[in-house]
Image: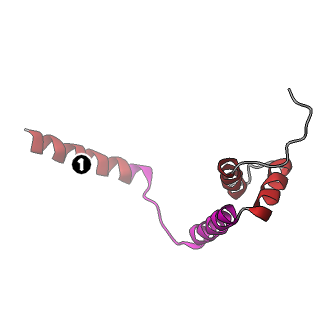
Amino acid sequence: MSSKLKITIPCDEANHVCDKTQYKEATLWEKIKLNIHLLYCRACREYTTNNAKLTKKIKESKVDCLDKKCKESMKKELDQAINEQSA
């Protein structure tokens, strides 16, 4: 194992850390490396900006999800309709 401290990260890892940061799962060291990467990578800065906008919009949304019972009922109806079409 190398004793060198690796500060730079590739874009795919930066995007992964960005996603982890969105869900508050990134470590402090990952966030530091991400911010260093964002200093020189325009594409990842854009990805991070878009990710933040998406997160904000999702939090602001007033979406009501179906409860489990309703979902199961819909699934049964769908399965029944598929079976009727197959027969």
In the image as oriented, which residue stretches furthest toward the top?
1
Percent position of residue 34, x then y: 78, 55
Q: Going 80% across and 59% down the picture, which residue do you hit?
A: 35
In the image as oriented, which residue stretches furthest toward the left?
87
Percent position of residue 72, x then y: 35, 47
Q: Is residue 79 magenta?
A: no
Tell me: 1 left or right of 53: right
Quarter of the image for residue 3 reads: top right
- Residue type beneath disc 1: Leu
Tell me: 29 left or right of 61: right
Magenta segment boundaries in residue numbering? 42-69
Question: Considering only vertical position in the picture, is 60 above or below 14?
Answer: below
Question: Considering only vertical position in the picture, is 5 above or below 22?
Answer: above
Q: Going 47% across and 65% down the picture, which residue do you hit?
A: 64
The majority secondary structure of the magenta stretch comes to: helix
Q: How many numbered circles does the render carry? A: 1
Residue located beneath label 1 in the image: 78
Q: Which image quarter is the N terminus in?
A: top right
Percent position of residue 75, x then y: 30, 47
Q: Going 57% across and 67% down the picture, which residue do you hit?
A: 58
